[in-house]
Amino acid sequence: MKTTQIKRGLRIILIVLMAASLSGCIYWIRAYQTYLQMGEFDQYFKTVTTDEFTLQFKEPILYSQDFVSLARLNPSEEHPDKTGKRWRYWFRKVDAKNKVIIPEIKFYSDLIFNQEGRITSWSFSSLFLQIAPPKFLEVSLRSIGGGKIDKEKKQLRANSLLIDKISEDLPKKPVVVAHLGPPLSVKDEADLEIYSYHFLLETPHIDEGYEDRALSVVELSFDKKTGELVRMSGRFAGLKVAINYRKFLDEPGQAS
């Protein structure tokens, strides 16, 4: 009992120190509290997979305005919901000049908030799941609980060593390309082919100086021999995501 109380006390101290080091912004305190919840994933979260992948927040902390403050981007759409409101962020595939490609290839991310304005669920549409399959998405979220925080860069690096590995087939290049279409560019790197895609966030307002955040540059790394998608990186509505899928497999190949 005493040890538990000490750990709780240390966490509170860490929250205060983190908030102070991040300019004292209250939304960073709530973000850090949510990060602490990730360390006890099943107690505070639940995942549901249908044609979407949804992360449910059992004891929500973050407010809708926290997302705008953190990302400096507003949602594409806002609609009233039975229990609060729903935000939708639309990402559309664009060419090198940021013009939407026709026919449209797009995906969305939904945030649901309760009547208090706190987030209760976060969903990703089926197209996004072509580059971040549900099981890999869930295990990457679970790994955040043991991640390291870079206070200067305000980034979180997940720790895949602290979670159970999974048995799952990696996405194949022909299937991914069938859904996303041809890439904007292809780069060779040792045993990898790196496909680059650009998606532009539809948003009514962007804070001055943050215009570049509306553009999502998604890089997909395919193994040249197997054609498997082994790594994905991108930024979505200000949220940077990078997943090395091999690290989550029972018997990973040579990590890149």
Image (spheres, helix red, strand yellow):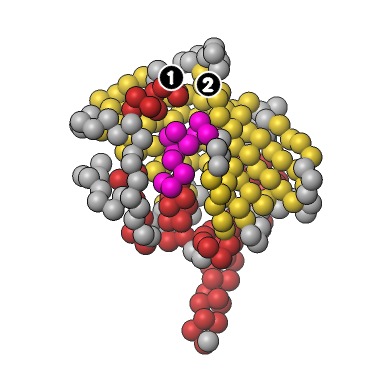
Q: Which residue is mark 2?
A: 105
**Residue at figure coordinates x 49%, y 84% from the top left:** 3
Q: Tell me if residue 216 can be seen.
A: yes
Viewer-closest of 213 and 254: 254
Counting from the top left corner in percent of width and height, residue 249 is at: 31, 50
Q: Secondary structure at mark 1?
A: loop
Viewer-closest of 154 and 164: 164
Viewer-closest of 60 and 74: 60
Q: How many marks?
A: 2
Q: Secondary structure at mark 2?
A: loop
Q: Contact (CB < 8 A) between labels 1 and 2?
A: yes
Counting from the top left corner in percent of width and height, residue 105 is at: 53, 21
**Residue at figure coordinates x 25%, y 25% from the top left:** 188
Counting from the top left corner in percent of width and height, residue 50 is at: 55, 42
> Tag 2: Cα neighbours inside 10 Å, few (<14), some, or many (≥20)?
some
The three-letter amino acid code for the residue at tag 1 is: Gly
Which mark identifies residue 181? 1
The residues colored magenta run 126-136
Residue 61 on the magenta segment: no
The three-letter amino acid code for the residue at tag 2 is: Ile
Q: CA distance from mark 1 to mark 2?
A: 8 Å
In the displayed structure image, the side of residue 51 where residue 226 appears, left or right: left
Give the mark, 1 or 2, whose residue is nearer the N terminus: 2
In the displayed structure image, the side of residue 101 where residue 167 appears, left or right: left
Please say if 173 is above or below 256.
Answer: above
**Residue at figure coordinates x 29%, y 24% from the top left:** 187
Counting from the top left corner in percent of width and height, residue 13 is at: 56, 71
